[in-house]
Protein backbone atom coordinates (compact mmCIF):
# COMPACT_ATOMS: atom_id res chain seq x y z
CA UNK A 1 0.00 0.00 0.00
CA UNK A 2 3.04 2.30 0.19
CA UNK A 3 2.87 3.22 -3.50
CA UNK A 4 -0.87 3.91 -3.16
CA UNK A 5 -0.14 6.40 -0.35
CA UNK A 6 2.70 7.95 -2.37
CA UNK A 7 0.58 8.36 -5.54
CA UNK A 8 -2.28 9.80 -3.49
CA UNK A 9 0.04 12.35 -1.85
CA UNK A 10 1.48 13.30 -5.25
CA UNK A 11 -2.00 13.66 -6.75
CA UNK A 12 -1.39 10.99 -9.40
CA UNK A 13 -4.14 8.67 -10.73
CA UNK A 14 -4.36 5.00 -9.74
CA UNK A 15 -6.76 2.13 -9.18
CA UNK A 16 -6.15 -0.87 -6.94
CA UNK A 17 -8.68 -3.71 -7.14
CA UNK A 18 -9.51 -7.38 -6.62
CA UNK A 19 -11.94 -9.38 -8.72
CA UNK A 20 -14.63 -11.59 -7.11
CA UNK A 21 -13.35 -14.76 -5.41
CA UNK A 22 -9.75 -14.09 -6.45
CA UNK A 23 -6.73 -13.92 -4.16
CA UNK A 24 -4.75 -11.39 -6.18
CA UNK A 25 -4.79 -7.62 -5.92
CA UNK A 26 -4.06 -5.72 -9.12
CA UNK A 27 -2.92 -2.11 -9.36
CA UNK A 28 -2.76 0.35 -12.26
CA UNK A 29 -0.72 3.54 -11.79
CA UNK A 30 -0.62 6.49 -14.18
CA UNK A 31 2.55 8.62 -14.02
CA UNK A 32 0.96 12.00 -14.87
CA UNK A 33 -2.30 13.67 -13.90
CA UNK A 34 -3.78 13.99 -17.41
CA UNK A 35 -7.43 13.16 -17.90
CA UNK A 36 -7.63 10.64 -20.75
CA UNK A 37 -11.10 10.23 -22.31
CA UNK A 38 -12.38 6.93 -23.67
CA UNK A 39 -13.32 7.53 -27.31
CA UNK A 40 -14.41 4.20 -28.79
CA UNK A 41 -13.48 1.49 -26.24
CA UNK A 42 -10.54 0.26 -28.32
CA UNK A 43 -8.20 1.97 -25.83
CA UNK A 44 -6.13 0.02 -23.30
CA UNK A 45 -6.20 0.69 -19.57
CA UNK A 46 -8.55 0.88 -16.60
CA UNK A 47 -11.88 2.54 -17.40
CA UNK A 48 -14.06 4.52 -14.97
CA UNK A 49 -17.39 5.53 -16.51
CA UNK A 50 -20.34 7.57 -15.22
CA UNK A 51 -24.05 6.72 -15.12
CA UNK A 52 -24.52 9.15 -18.02
CA UNK A 53 -22.02 7.73 -20.50
CA UNK A 54 -22.50 10.80 -22.71
CA UNK A 55 -20.60 12.75 -20.00
CA UNK A 56 -17.49 10.75 -20.87
CA UNK A 57 -15.62 7.76 -19.45
CA UNK A 58 -12.12 8.20 -17.99
CA UNK A 59 -9.16 5.94 -18.83
CA UNK A 60 -6.23 5.31 -16.49
CA UNK A 61 -3.13 4.63 -18.56
CA UNK A 62 -1.28 1.50 -17.34
CA UNK A 63 2.11 3.21 -17.03
CA UNK A 64 2.92 0.93 -14.09
CA UNK A 65 1.12 -2.28 -13.14
CA UNK A 66 1.52 -4.53 -10.12
CA UNK A 67 0.13 -7.82 -8.88
CA UNK A 68 0.29 -9.14 -5.33
CA UNK A 69 -1.32 -11.96 -3.39
CA UNK A 70 -4.04 -11.41 -0.81
CA UNK A 71 -5.63 -14.13 1.27
CA UNK A 72 -7.51 -14.00 4.53
CA UNK A 73 -9.65 -16.55 6.27
CA UNK A 74 -10.78 -13.97 8.82
CA UNK A 75 -13.85 -11.94 7.91
CA UNK A 76 -14.72 -8.98 10.13
CA UNK A 77 -18.00 -9.31 11.96
CA UNK A 78 -20.89 -7.33 10.49
CA UNK A 79 -22.26 -5.26 13.32
CA UNK A 80 -25.91 -4.22 13.59
CA UNK A 81 -25.37 -0.49 13.21
CA UNK A 82 -28.08 2.13 13.50
CA UNK A 83 -28.96 4.17 10.41
CA UNK A 84 -30.42 7.66 10.22
CA UNK A 85 -34.00 8.38 9.15
CA UNK A 86 -32.89 11.60 7.43
CA UNK A 87 -34.32 11.78 3.91
CA UNK A 88 -37.11 9.29 4.60
CA UNK A 89 -40.09 11.36 3.44
CA UNK A 90 -38.31 12.60 0.32
CA UNK A 91 -37.51 9.00 -0.69
CA UNK A 92 -41.05 7.80 0.04
CA UNK A 93 -42.40 10.59 -2.20
CA UNK A 94 -39.89 9.72 -4.95
CA UNK A 95 -40.87 6.05 -4.88
CA UNK A 96 -44.57 6.91 -4.94
CA UNK A 97 -44.00 9.09 -8.00
CA UNK A 98 -42.18 6.19 -9.69
CA UNK A 99 -45.07 3.80 -8.94
CA UNK A 100 -47.49 6.31 -10.50
CA UNK A 101 -45.39 6.45 -13.71
CA UNK A 102 -45.48 2.64 -13.90
CA UNK A 103 -49.25 2.57 -13.26
CA UNK A 104 -49.70 5.09 -16.09
CA UNK A 105 -47.89 2.68 -18.44
CA UNK A 106 -44.91 4.96 -19.10
CA UNK A 107 -42.41 2.68 -17.32
CA UNK A 108 -42.11 -1.04 -16.57
CA UNK A 109 -39.52 -0.57 -13.83
CA UNK A 110 -37.41 2.29 -12.51
CA UNK A 111 -34.45 2.22 -10.11
CA UNK A 112 -34.54 5.13 -7.67
CA UNK A 113 -31.69 6.08 -5.37
CA UNK A 114 -30.52 8.55 -2.76
CA UNK A 115 -27.29 9.77 -1.22
CA UNK A 116 -26.32 9.93 2.46
CA UNK A 117 -23.20 11.33 4.08
CA UNK A 118 -21.06 10.05 6.92
CA UNK A 119 -17.99 11.61 8.54
CA UNK A 120 -14.89 9.39 8.65
CA UNK A 121 -11.24 9.77 9.53
CA UNK A 122 -10.16 6.34 8.28
CA UNK A 123 -7.26 6.38 5.77
CA UNK A 124 -8.31 5.29 2.27
CA UNK A 125 -6.03 2.24 2.35
CA UNK A 126 -7.63 1.07 5.60
CA UNK A 127 -11.11 1.42 4.06
CA UNK A 128 -10.00 -0.62 1.02
CA UNK A 129 -8.44 -3.27 3.26
CA UNK A 130 -11.71 -3.72 5.14
CA UNK A 131 -13.65 -3.98 1.88
CA UNK A 132 -11.36 -6.83 0.78
CA UNK A 133 -11.91 -8.76 4.01
CA UNK A 134 -15.65 -8.11 4.23
CA UNK A 135 -16.69 -8.87 0.64
CA UNK A 136 -14.67 -11.71 -0.94
CA UNK A 137 -17.41 -12.35 -3.54
CA UNK A 138 -17.47 -8.75 -4.79
CA UNK A 139 -15.32 -6.62 -7.08
CA UNK A 140 -13.52 -4.45 -4.54
CA UNK A 141 -11.70 -1.32 -5.65
CA UNK A 142 -10.10 1.99 -4.67
CA UNK A 143 -9.92 4.57 -7.48
CA UNK A 144 -8.31 8.01 -7.46
CA UNK A 145 -7.89 10.69 -10.09
CA UNK A 146 -7.27 14.32 -9.02
CA UNK A 147 -9.70 15.55 -11.71
CA UNK A 148 -12.38 12.97 -10.92
CA UNK A 149 -12.18 12.19 -7.20
CA UNK A 150 -11.70 9.27 -4.82
CA UNK A 151 -14.11 6.35 -5.03
CA UNK A 152 -14.22 2.87 -3.51
CA UNK A 153 -16.69 0.04 -3.35
CA UNK A 154 -17.56 -3.64 -3.31
CA UNK A 155 -19.95 -4.31 -6.18
CA UNK A 156 -21.77 -7.63 -6.65
CA UNK A 157 -22.70 -6.96 -10.29
CA UNK A 158 -20.79 -7.71 -13.49
CA UNK A 159 -21.59 -5.42 -16.40
CA UNK A 160 -19.84 -7.60 -18.99
CA UNK A 161 -16.82 -9.84 -19.48
CA UNK A 162 -15.59 -10.55 -23.01
CA UNK A 163 -12.84 -13.05 -23.79
CA UNK A 164 -12.23 -14.89 -27.08
CA UNK A 165 -15.61 -13.66 -28.39
CA UNK A 166 -17.36 -15.22 -25.37
CA UNK A 167 -19.61 -12.73 -23.57
CA UNK A 168 -20.62 -13.12 -19.93
CA UNK A 169 -22.99 -10.85 -18.07
CA UNK A 170 -25.67 -11.21 -15.42
CA UNK A 171 -29.19 -10.28 -14.53
CA UNK A 172 -29.21 -9.04 -10.92
CA UNK A 173 -32.29 -7.83 -9.07
CA UNK A 174 -34.22 -8.05 -5.80
CA UNK A 175 -32.85 -7.67 -2.28
CA UNK A 176 -33.50 -9.28 1.10
CA UNK A 177 -31.46 -8.92 4.31
CA UNK A 178 -29.22 -11.85 5.25
CA UNK A 179 -30.32 -13.63 8.43
CA UNK A 180 -28.01 -16.27 9.90
CA UNK A 181 -29.38 -19.79 9.39
CA UNK A 182 -32.25 -18.71 7.12
CA UNK A 183 -32.66 -19.06 3.35
CA UNK A 184 -34.24 -16.12 1.51
CA UNK A 185 -37.99 -16.30 0.94
CA UNK A 186 -38.60 -14.40 -2.30
CA UNK A 187 -42.00 -12.83 -2.94
CA UNK A 188 -43.75 -12.44 -6.28
CA UNK A 189 -42.53 -8.83 -6.60
CA UNK A 190 -38.86 -9.87 -6.40
CA UNK A 191 -39.28 -12.86 -8.74
CA UNK A 192 -41.08 -10.76 -11.35
CA UNK A 193 -38.51 -7.97 -11.10
CA UNK A 194 -35.63 -10.38 -11.67
CA UNK A 195 -37.38 -12.06 -14.63
CA UNK A 196 -38.09 -8.64 -16.15
CA UNK A 197 -34.38 -7.79 -16.04
CA UNK A 198 -33.37 -11.17 -17.57
CA UNK A 199 -35.90 -10.83 -20.40
CA UNK A 200 -34.80 -7.28 -21.17
CA UNK A 201 -31.08 -8.11 -21.34
CA UNK A 202 -31.82 -11.11 -23.57
CA UNK A 203 -33.90 -8.93 -25.90
CA UNK A 204 -31.15 -6.26 -26.07
CA UNK A 205 -28.24 -8.64 -26.70
CA UNK A 206 -29.75 -11.26 -29.01
CA UNK A 207 -29.28 -9.32 -32.31
CA UNK A 208 -25.53 -8.93 -31.58
CA UNK A 209 -24.91 -12.55 -30.61
CA UNK A 210 -24.47 -15.87 -32.41
CA UNK A 211 -25.74 -17.72 -29.34
CA UNK A 212 -27.15 -16.58 -25.98
CA UNK A 213 -28.12 -18.60 -22.92
CA UNK A 214 -29.86 -17.26 -19.78
CA UNK A 215 -29.62 -19.48 -16.70
CA UNK A 216 -32.33 -19.81 -14.06
CA UNK A 217 -32.19 -17.32 -11.19
CA UNK A 218 -30.30 -18.28 -8.04
CA UNK A 219 -29.99 -16.66 -4.62
CA UNK A 220 -26.56 -15.13 -4.06
CA UNK A 221 -25.21 -13.49 -0.93
CA UNK A 222 -23.39 -10.15 -0.99
CA UNK A 223 -22.25 -9.31 2.54
CA UNK A 224 -25.37 -8.82 4.67
CA UNK A 225 -27.76 -8.97 1.69
CA UNK A 226 -29.30 -11.58 -0.60
CA UNK A 227 -29.95 -10.98 -4.32
CA UNK A 228 -31.43 -12.97 -7.21
CA UNK A 229 -28.99 -13.51 -10.08
CA UNK A 230 -29.08 -15.21 -13.48
CA UNK A 231 -25.83 -15.88 -15.33
CA UNK A 232 -25.99 -14.95 -19.03
CA UNK A 233 -23.48 -16.31 -21.54
CA UNK A 234 -23.13 -16.17 -25.30
CA UNK A 235 -20.87 -15.86 -28.34
CA UNK A 236 -20.37 -12.51 -30.03
CA UNK A 237 -21.39 -12.29 -33.70
CA UNK A 238 -18.66 -11.51 -36.22
CA UNK A 239 -19.58 -7.86 -36.74
CA UNK A 240 -20.21 -6.88 -33.10
CA UNK A 241 -17.78 -4.67 -31.17
CA UNK A 242 -16.95 -4.11 -27.50
CA UNK A 243 -18.37 -0.58 -27.78
CA UNK A 244 -21.66 -1.94 -29.14
CA UNK A 245 -22.10 -4.46 -26.34
CA UNK A 246 -21.34 -1.86 -23.66
CA UNK A 247 -23.85 0.57 -25.18
CA UNK A 248 -26.50 -2.17 -25.24
CA UNK A 249 -25.97 -3.10 -21.58
CA UNK A 250 -25.27 0.24 -19.88
CA UNK A 251 -27.12 1.40 -17.93
CA UNK A 252 -28.55 -1.98 -16.92
CA UNK A 253 -32.16 -2.46 -15.79
CA UNK A 254 -30.70 -3.23 -12.35
CA UNK A 255 -29.51 0.39 -11.98
CA UNK A 256 -31.81 2.32 -14.34
CA UNK A 257 -35.05 0.64 -15.40
CA UNK A 258 -37.18 -0.52 -18.32
CA UNK A 259 -37.42 0.88 -20.93
CA UNK A 260 -33.94 2.33 -20.42
CA UNK A 261 -34.30 5.79 -21.94
CA UNK A 262 -37.65 6.59 -20.32
CA UNK A 263 -36.39 5.36 -16.93
CA UNK A 264 -33.15 7.36 -17.30
CA UNK A 265 -35.09 10.53 -18.10
CA UNK A 266 -37.32 10.01 -15.05
CA UNK A 267 -34.27 9.50 -12.82
CA UNK A 268 -32.50 12.62 -14.09
CA UNK A 269 -35.63 14.73 -13.63
CA UNK A 270 -36.68 13.43 -10.20
CA UNK A 271 -33.70 12.31 -8.10
CA UNK A 272 -32.53 15.29 -6.04
CA UNK A 273 -28.78 14.77 -6.65
CA UNK A 274 -26.39 13.87 -9.48
CA UNK A 275 -25.29 10.21 -9.52
CA UNK A 276 -22.02 11.01 -11.38
CA UNK A 277 -20.08 7.69 -11.19
CA UNK A 278 -22.56 5.80 -8.99
CA UNK A 279 -24.26 3.18 -11.22
CA UNK A 280 -21.61 3.79 -13.87
CA UNK A 281 -19.07 1.03 -14.55
CA UNK A 282 -15.38 0.34 -14.13
CA UNK A 283 -12.72 -2.26 -14.87
CA UNK A 284 -10.18 -3.60 -17.33
CA UNK A 285 -10.45 -2.43 -20.93
CA UNK A 286 -8.18 -4.28 -23.39
CA UNK A 287 -5.65 -4.21 -20.56
CA UNK A 288 -3.96 -7.53 -21.32
CA UNK A 289 -5.42 -8.58 -24.68
CA UNK A 290 -7.23 -6.65 -27.42
CA UNK A 291 -11.06 -7.02 -27.36
CA UNK A 292 -10.90 -8.48 -23.83
CA UNK A 293 -12.80 -6.60 -21.14
CA UNK A 294 -13.82 -7.17 -17.53
CA UNK A 295 -16.27 -4.50 -16.38
CA UNK A 296 -18.35 -4.13 -13.22
CA UNK A 297 -21.32 -1.91 -12.32
CA UNK A 298 -20.43 0.72 -9.71
CA UNK A 299 -22.79 -0.33 -6.90
CA UNK A 300 -22.24 -0.55 -3.11
CA UNK A 301 -19.83 2.34 -3.43
CA UNK A 302 -18.89 5.66 -1.89
CA UNK A 303 -17.11 8.85 -2.85
CA UNK A 304 -14.55 10.18 -0.36
CA UNK A 305 -13.99 13.93 -0.09
CA UNK A 306 -11.84 15.03 2.84
CA UNK A 307 -13.44 13.54 5.96
CA UNK A 308 -16.84 13.05 4.29
CA UNK A 309 -18.00 9.81 2.68
CA UNK A 310 -20.98 10.04 0.31
CA UNK A 311 -22.80 6.69 0.22
CA UNK A 312 -25.28 5.83 -2.54
CA UNK A 313 -28.20 3.40 -2.22
CA UNK A 314 -31.21 2.56 -4.37
CA UNK A 315 -33.76 -0.05 -5.30
CA UNK A 316 -35.87 -1.31 -8.19
CA UNK A 317 -39.43 0.02 -8.27
CA UNK A 318 -42.19 -1.98 -9.95
CA UNK A 319 -45.99 -1.87 -9.93
CA UNK A 320 -45.94 -4.10 -6.81
CA UNK A 321 -43.57 -1.86 -4.83
CA UNK A 322 -44.46 -0.43 -1.43
CA UNK A 323 -42.70 2.88 -0.58
CA UNK A 324 -42.10 1.94 3.06
CA UNK A 325 -40.52 -1.40 2.11
CA UNK A 326 -38.37 0.35 -0.50
CA UNK A 327 -37.11 2.77 2.17
CA UNK A 328 -36.21 -0.16 4.43
CA UNK A 329 -34.37 -1.83 1.53
CA UNK A 330 -32.18 1.25 1.02
CA UNK A 331 -31.56 1.37 4.77
CA UNK A 332 -30.35 -2.25 4.65
CA UNK A 333 -28.14 -1.51 1.64
CA UNK A 334 -26.59 1.53 3.33
CA UNK A 335 -25.19 -0.73 6.05
CA UNK A 336 -22.82 -2.32 3.48
CA UNK A 337 -20.68 0.82 3.33
CA UNK A 338 -21.52 2.16 6.81
CA UNK A 339 -20.09 -1.06 8.31
CA UNK A 340 -16.82 -0.36 6.49
CA UNK A 341 -16.61 3.11 8.03
Image: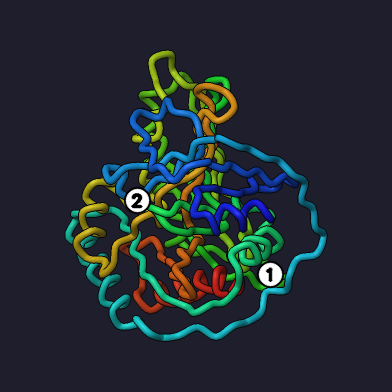
Tag on residue 95?
none
Is 70 positioned to the left or the right of 134 in the image?
Answer: right
On the question of residue 214 being in view, the answer is no
Residue 336: where, in percent of width, then height? 56, 69
> Is 305 or 96 nearer to us in this picture?
305
Residue mark closest to the camera, 1 vs 2: 2
Question: From what the image shows, is residue 208 above or below residue 336?
Answer: above
Is 62 positioned to the left or the right of 311 in the image?
Answer: right
Which residue is depicted at the point 54% across and 44% down? 230
Question: From what the image shows, is residue 140 above or below residue 225?
Answer: above
Query: Quadrant of the image for the C terminus?
Result: bottom right
User: Which residue has dot 1 on it?
Assistant: 182
Tag on residue 51?
2
> Is 325 or 67 nearer to us in this picture?
67
Q: SS of the residue at dot 1?
A: loop
Question: From what the image shows, is residue 58 above or below residue 292?
Answer: below
Q: Earlier in the sequence, mark 1 or mark 2?
A: 2
Amino acid sequence: MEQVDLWFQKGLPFCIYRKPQEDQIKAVFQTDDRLHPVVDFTESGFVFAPFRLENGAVLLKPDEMYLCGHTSSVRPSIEEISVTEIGRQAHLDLVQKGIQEIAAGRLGKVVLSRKLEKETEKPITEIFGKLLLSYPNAFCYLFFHPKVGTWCGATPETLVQIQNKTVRTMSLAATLPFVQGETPNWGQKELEEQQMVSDYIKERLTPSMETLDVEAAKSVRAGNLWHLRSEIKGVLSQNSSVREIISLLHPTPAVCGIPTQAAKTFILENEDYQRTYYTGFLGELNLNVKAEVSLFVNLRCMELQGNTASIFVGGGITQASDPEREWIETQNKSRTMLNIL
